[in-house]
Image: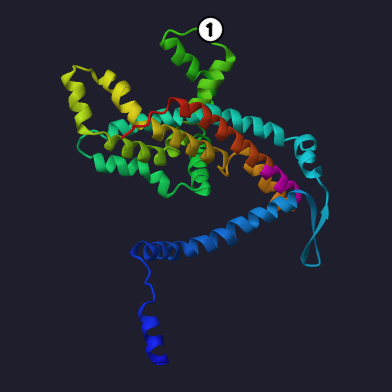
Amino acid sequence: MSRKKVSSGAAKRPRLSYERRKALYGYGFISLWLLGTIWFFLIPLGKSLIYSFNSVGIESGHMTMKWSGLDNYSAALNKDQYYVDHLEKTLLETLWRTPLILIFSLFIAVVLNQKFRGRTLARAVFFLPVIIATGPVFRVINDDMDATGTSSGQPQFSTLLHTDLVDELMHFLGVYDMSGRMTGFITAVADSVFGIVWSSGIQILLFLAALQNIPPSAREAAQIEGATSWEYFWKIVFPYVSPFVLANLIFTVIDSFTDPMNEVMRRILVFQTVDINYGLASAMAWLYFGIILAAIAVVTFIVNKFVYYEVD
């Protein structure tokens, strides 16, 4: 009798539901990613926060820490002669580069969304920087472009822009007596054309995905109503892609701040790899991280008011 009871109990054991099994499969699929995130990201992140409040040294093959409170943060802001200047320069550069990248990306995405011969090749060309978009590659290409004139004894292209090319262009367009600040801004934009194109691959891809999700019925309705292409863009296209404008804006801000070629990142790496001052480098990095979060929060709060979300 007892043997029969055991067998009947085993027969009544509940099986996992299909939804539960799918959830377990999902957790199993991301388990390696979770372990890698914890081991290679969260643990180093916590250690860097601890380093920022300590004076870190290396003795006899091991690290020593002595509590210093906010001394590293004070040193980064008040004693280091370059950190604050680099912060201001990076913030200003991000402020004017981000709108240009978004405008350029949206323009190229609209063009690439049209039907023309060689469209696939054109899309691949604009997405190519994403595949090789590493700091060393960009630095080598950019340095080669800057050095093309010096090796042949001719003045560099950037030097020509800084001298009289901008003034001549403005005079050709009928603009005279420009301020030095405006001339400097136009020159900086002209010098950064390659970097803007290089940094627009992901944004173009996201805008293309948004444009392809616009229903054909919206285009047909606009044509029936007699809307021009300009009206169609502002009344139909732009509202549909506005959520992706916010996503691309956040991505561009983060990408600009974390670019290993900007001055703040270089300054942090100097203290980390050259001066071996992990405490000060960690404090600089956490200050920079706080500024990035604040900038993203402000941008999201402002832009989110102008984003159109379609309600089913």
Residue 194, quarter of the rendered image: top left
Label 1: state its secondary structure.
loop
**Which residue does the numbered mark 1 point to in the structure image?**
177
Residue drawn 57% across the image and 11% down it: 179
Can residue 285 be found in the magenta stretch?
A: yes
Q: Position of residue 59 (x, y in %)?
A: 81, 63
**Looking at the image, is 9 positioned above or below residue 288?**
below
Q: Nearer the viewer, residue 157 or 260?
A: 260
Q: What kind of secondary structure does the magenta stretch mostly adopt?
A: helix
Q: Position of residue 7 (x, y in %)?
A: 37, 86
Q: Quadrant of the C terminus?
A: top left
| Magenta span of residues | 278-286
Q: Nearer the viewer, residue 289 or 302?
A: 302
Residue 73, quarter of the rendered image: top right
How is the model colour-coded? rainbow
Q: Nearer the viewer, residue 224 or 27?
A: 27
Q: Quadrant of the N terminus?
A: bottom left
The local crowd at label 1, few if under 14, some if 14 to 19, many if 20 or more residues have their Cα within 10 Å, is few
- Residue 55 falls left or right of residue 7: right
